[in-house]
Image (spheres, rainbow, N blue to C red):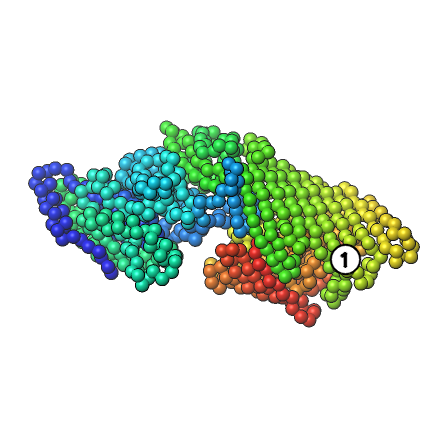
Amino acid sequence: MVLKSIKPFSLILIFLFLHLNLLSQENRPKIGLVLSGGGAKGIAHIGVLKAMEEAGLTPDYITGTSMGSIIGGLYSIGYSADELAEIAKTADWEYLLSNKIPLDRVTFEEKFYYGRYLLEFYYQDKKIVTPRGIIEGQALLDYFSYLTRPVHDLRNFDEFPIPFKCVATDIETGEPVVLDKGSLAMAMRASMAIPSIFTPVTIDDKLLVDGGLVRNMPVDEVLDMGADIIIGVFVSSDLDPAENLNSPLAILSQATFIKSAFDSRKQMDKCDILISPDLKEFSTGSFSSAQGILEQGNKAGNDYKKVFKNLADSLKKIEPLNKIDKPKISDEYIISKIIVKGNKVIPDEYIIGKMRIDPGEIVSINKIEEQISIIYGTQYFERIWYEINKNDSTYSLHIDVVERPKVQFRFAYHYDTENSGGVVINTTLRNLLLNKSRLIFEANLATQPSYLMDYFKYLGEKQKVAFRARGLHSRNDLPLYDEEGNVNNEFRHRYSIIGINFQSTIKRNSTYGFGIEWTHTDLTPEIVQENVEFLTKVVYNNARLRLFYRYNNLNKRYFPSEGIKLDIIASTTVGSNGTFTLGDTLEIDENNESIEIIQTSAINTLEVNVDPIIPLNDKISIINQNRLRISTQETGFFNFSEYDFVGGFTPAIINSYQYWGGGIKEFYLANYFYSKVGIQYEVKNNLFLTAIINYLDTENPMKWIYPNVDTGLAGDRSSRFGYGMKIGYMSPVGPFAFAFAKDHYRKGWQTSLIIGFHY
């Protein structure tokens, strides 16, 4: 244990000062507590606070920087050391300090696009705008807003149970900025905004980053508050010796904190009691080791408990110490009004409507958090936070937002052995045409390209319903296989779909609605060996009505570890016709004439997908995917928009589905049942191993449900099963995976290398 110091001379002066105060009956000296920054190592502050509590020593003032601002800020509003320890141990730090919110916190209409791009830029004021940091920190800000509810009403930090100040850095001037009023949640967020890692925070027109850059140990600030006796806890480190500066990153880090290190030395010299817990086994990022850091903090605190006790007893002889009571935290509020600030383009009505709170309604904190999450999940905002302020017997809900620019560009790449590779370019326009709307243009520039347009418009005062118009055009290869799984023909498949629908937006993870869509299929042969040598072109057009319900609360797009995805879609065609253009090899039609086919009976289809993922522990999950498709489509038609192309690991067209062990898009089926069951194991952080078995049936249970269904075969049989494994890694530049599988009834293995943001 390295205990920095109790200055002997300072200690003598302290007790002499106390003795003289006792004799003169003056006001007792004030205790100032200073908590330094240090990232995860700042959790050790809690151990010193616990020792002070047990010794009966309450600080009169607290200052903190970075992690010290978080611990000190929460302690100043009444959280006990035990409560802070519980927060430190149970908080999901990986989530709180991540750049992405989980997929299940994104609104349903945005889930398809969320988390599948490598780069994101904005266009504003006729220039490209890049993010100012890697991590926006919305999850952390949500948590701060939740924890600081007791003092949302208090705008001056001097009014806290223990007066408090924290320090940030004005990145424009390089000067320290003392934060002592306004939003405590935002002040803490600003004080720990590590440059380039966390985005900076604007307060009073100042662009603020981590206070540790210039004032990591804010002793002067607590002296200015009126403290007479200074207790400092320093959990950071001094400059590294030359032998440790063995990389460009180490040199850059050292250079960045030279000014702060010299300032910290001067500040620490002003402490009467200076405590430095032994944290050499931990780093600023060791949040997963919260328990170990707490233990080191407890050891450091216990070594000073006797000093704290003597000091407390001496102070109490002059005047009682402050008794700290945490303000009451309510879980329900009568919300009389909602006040929105920070929005420039998006109207108040949109945000207030999304909250779905009527004036005078009794609202739980859970609902407020849920609706704030839904608003952020719309992707219209870079940052959003809230405060609940008391007005007599009711409360007002204050919502502050930072809007995203109207124009956003997103880029991704993808490659897999089955479909080759490409680059995705996405342009997203928000509120450019109409308020409460989003328009997306996306191009998949690939060997098998696709182009997408998606327009989404919220309707109504509370946006419970939305209108959507969507168009897609894709061009891809469509192989035809023989019964043994060998490709004997190949078509160029052009597929277009235009659809409009109305859907619900009440729930974040689900939607239901109805619509109509038109599909156009165009097939032209590229490789012809047998059976279809007379075809030169096949065109089909369909119009269908659709009802749908969708649910998705998977926690991640790639390698999800929990949640369920559910789709139920019922459709019926209201028009279907096709045209065959025949080659001159067919005797009854020597002039390549077209033959038109009209399907007069409606094609009714029911599609059900149920994909639960059940976590067994933090590392292992059971994965299960199921699909049932029942259709009145008769076999033998080339109306391919009414079939699924089943087979492969990652089939990449809209009406396709996987079957591990089969060739890519090998079986075209109107009726089938598919099920996959497996175990996903996270071997190391973001490294996954998955083993599966999957089953495909073209007769049952469809015939049990609808005995007249027209079934086909999957190759040479009505049912098949296969098994395989996948090794995957979620890297900073996207997912990587290698999969291999075998169909039980065939020789040889199917393999695929999958790189990038497949969707």
- Residue projecting furthest to the bottom: 747
Q: Which residue is mark 1?
A: 526
Nearest to the observer: residue 533 or residue 396:
533
In which quarter of the view is residue 208 placed? top left
- Residue projecting furthest to the left: 23
Q: What residue lies at 28% left-to-right and 36% top-to-bottom?
A: 158
Q: Is residue 753 left or right of residue 619?
A: right
Q: Is residue 243 visible?
A: yes
Q: In this figure, what is the number of numbered marks?
A: 1
Q: Is residue 729 left or right of residue 237?
A: right
Q: Is residue 702 visible?
A: no
Nearest to the observer: residue 724 or residue 134:
134
In the displayed structure, would residue 258 be above or below residue 728?
above
Rendering coords of residue 603 (x, y %)? 76, 47
In the displayed structure, would residue 100 be above or below residue 178?
below
Quadrant where the N terminus sits is bottom left
Q: What residue lies at 43% left-to-right and 39% top-to-bottom?
A: 385
